[in-house]
Every structure is written in structure tokens, then in C-alpha cells.
């Protein structure tokens, strides 16, 4: 075998080995239509692999060789907690008058929760807040420092922005319900880990089963992942028609994202318009009795 051919095989083999986890996790490999960047996709999501070695085997005429740094660690895919929503029994609708007491009892349970290691580092659990008969539930990721101290979701800087978003659609914070995927603060505001999400998401599902909102509004990738199973970038989830147990789900960025990139705030407005449109459509269908009617599963 010639030297260049041997090099090419070595690089190709290194590339596949480096990508091994992608195949083990059952996802597919995609190549960008315009090399030289090769893309490894999890459920169609592109994760770029930085080039250094040529792989003539997948180079196409006019585009030059695709190159891959086989020594570079492949970024880990976003962890996928098991989506167990559909395994939960969908209980009979709870009369609106009983919801506050049921949620309060659940909050007491959650306050003593030790299902995952976040119990050791939290100050307070952050259960959820708002109208137990809300038409809209906003779902965030997990408490930050302010929320951990006060025991209420979205009271810090991102919360101020969320309040503005809620007011922009003509509602007040007390009209909607606000909850998180995880009820305890991940130390240092790191992302919640798969096992933490897996341990905690049932609380969110039970909250939603009690409230039975008409629409769920996901704030950021963890809420989207938890309620739709969509593990791709938030930008790719926006505008797509998801539902959780028959309840429409709107996928949107986390308010903290707009604090970091204020020029993207237009996206928030677009998603809020989607929300208003769906709420109006439900109103015109006479769906105001959502509180008692189980959505189609
Ligand atoms: N970010 C969240 O996702 N939730 C909160 O409660 C606060 C900040």
C-alpha cells in the first residue's frame, strides 16, 4: 500500500473510532453538503469536528479533502434523560378548586426530597409558583442562586426578563404558572445532569397533570428535552409543533440567553406571538374549560 493511501486509511479509521459513541447511541452520521467540514449528527444535529488530517476517501471533487483531528475529544452529546411521561398514568382531571391543595402537598414532599445529590447542596427546593389553574405553564431549567435562596423560580435577572415577557402578552406573573425541570440548584449554576433530570422530572409531570394547562412554554434546552425529547439546538426546535400528552408545547430560548445576547430578543417576541395565537385559537374553539377536560393523549 502506498504511503498516502496508508495515511488516508489511518485517518479514516481514527475518525470512525473517534465517532464511535454516535453509532452506539443509535444516531446517524451526516456530512455537511459543503465540505471541508464533516458533521457528526445526533438525531440530525451537527457537531462539527475540527479538521487536521486529510480523508481523501470522503473528499469530493472541487471541495478539497475533509480533515479530522483524531486526537481532539469528541464533544459529548447532550445527555438524554429517559422521557417517561408516557409511562405515567394520566390521572383524571383534578377539579380546579382542589389544585392549590394538591400542589401545596406536593411542594411539601419535594421540600424533603433526596432523590439526587442536589439535595446536599441546595438551600431550598424551588417547587413552582403561580396560578394552579393557569392556561400557560412556563418551564425553565433549574434554580439559580437567587431562586435557591428565596425558594421561588425566576426571581433573579432572568426572572425579571421573564416577567416582562409575560406582561408583553397581556398577562401577569400571577396569571401563569412557572416551574423548572429540576427543583434544586445545580452547584455553580452548571447544567443539570441526566440523572438529576431523570430523578426530578416526575415532579414536573405531576405538576402539569394537576394544572392541565392549555399550553406549555419551554424556556431553554432542558425544558425542551424533558417535554419533547428534542435534543437538538433550541434554534432548531423553535416553531416546531411539539406536544406533551396532547398539550401543545412551544419551544423557546431561555431568558438568560437574551441577557447574554440581547440582539436575539426578537426571537422571544416571535415565540410569544405564537403563544398568543394559540391561546386565541383555543379561546375561539371555546376551550376555556381546559381545567376539567383531559387533553387527547
Ligand atoms: N433559570 C431557570 O431555568 N430557572 C429559574 O428558576 C431561574 C433561572
Image (cartoon, helix red, strand yellow):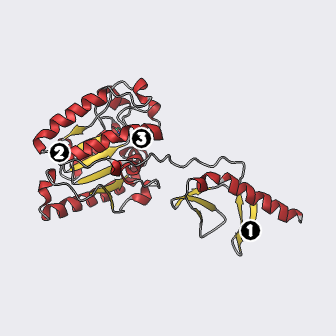
Judge the density around disc 1: few (<14), some (14-19), many (≥20) Cα neighbours within 10 Å: few
Percent coordinates x, y for residue 292 in the rendering: 13, 51
Instruction: Tell me which label, 2 or 1, sits earlier in the chain.
Output: 1
Q: What residue does disc 1 label?
A: 57
189 vs 78, nearest the viewer: 78
Q: How many marks?
A: 3
Q: In this view, which residue lies farthest toward the bottom?
A: 61
Q: Is residue 87 left or right of residue 95?
A: right
Residue 130 visible in the snapshot = yes
Percent coordinates x, y for residue 258 in the rendering: 38, 48
Percent coordinates x, y for residue 34 in the rendering: 61, 69
Whether residue 16 is situated above or below residue 33 in the rendered picture? above
Q: Is residue 297 left or right of residue 40?
A: left
The residue sitting at 42% across, 25% down in the picture is 121
The residue sitting at 42% across, 41% down in the picture is 198
149 vs 214, nearest the viewer: 214
Q: What residue does disc 3 label?
A: 198
Whether residue 269 is situated above or below residue 113 in the rendered picture? below
Judge the density around disc 2: few (<14), some (14-19), many (≥20) Cα neighbours within 10 Å: some
Q: Are marks 1 and 3 in contact (CB under 8 Å)?
A: no
Q: What residue does disc 2 label?
A: 175
Residue 193 visible in the snapshot = no
Instruction: Tell me which label, 1 or 3, sits earlier in the chain.
Output: 1
Amino acid at each position: 500500500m502506498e504511503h498516502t493511501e496508508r495515511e488516508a486509511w489511518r485517518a479514516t479509521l481514527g475518525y470512525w473510532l473517534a465517532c464511535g459513541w454516535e453509532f452506539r447511541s443509535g444516531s446517524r452520521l451526516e456530512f455537511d453538503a459543503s465540505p471541508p467540514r464533516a458533521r457528526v449528527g445526533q438525531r440530525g444535529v451537527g457537531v462539527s469536528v475540527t479538521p487536521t488530517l486529510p480523508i481523501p476517501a470522503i473528499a469530493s471533487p472541487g471541495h478539497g479533502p475533509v480533515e479530522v483531528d483524531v486526537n481532539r475529544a469528541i464533544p459529548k452529546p447532550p445527555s438524554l434523560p429517559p422521557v417517561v411521561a408516557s409511562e405515567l398514568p394520566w390521572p383524571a382531571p383534578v377539579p380546579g378548586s382542589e389544585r392549590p391543595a394538591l400542589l401545596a402537598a406536593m411542594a411539601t414532599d419535594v421540600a424533603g426530597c433526596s432523590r439526587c445529590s442536589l439535595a446536599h447542596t441546595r438551600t431550598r427546593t424551588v417547587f413552582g409558583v403561580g396560578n394552579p389553574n393557569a392556561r400557560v405553564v412556563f418551564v425553565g431549567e433549574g434554580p439559580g442562586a437567587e431562586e435557591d435562596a428565596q425558594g421561588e423560580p425566576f426571581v433573579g435577572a432572568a426572572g425579571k426578563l421573564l416577567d416582562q415577557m409575560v406582561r408583553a402578552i397581556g398577562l401577569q406573573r400571577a396569571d401563569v404558572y412557572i416551574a423548572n425541570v429540576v427543583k434544586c440548584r445545580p452547584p455553580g449554576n452548571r447544567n443539570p445532569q441526566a440523572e438529576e433530570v431523570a430523578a426530578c422530572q416526575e415532579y414536573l409531570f405531576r405538576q402539569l397533570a394537576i394544572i392541565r394547562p392549555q399550553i406549555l412554554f419551554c424556556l431553554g434546552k432542558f425544558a425542551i428535552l424533558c417535554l419533547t425529547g428534542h435534543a437538538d439546538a433550541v434554534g432548531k426546535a423553535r416553531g416546531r409543533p411539539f406536544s406533551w400528552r396532547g398539550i401543545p408545547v412551544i419551544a423557546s430560548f431561555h431568558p438568560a440567553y437574551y441577557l447574554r445576547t440581547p440582539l436575539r430578543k426578537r426571537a422571544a417576541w416571535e415565540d410569544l406571538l405564537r403563544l398568543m395565537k394559540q391561546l386565541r385559537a383555543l379561546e375561539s374553539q371555546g376551550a376555556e374549560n381546559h381545567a376539567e377536560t383531559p387533553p387527547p393523549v
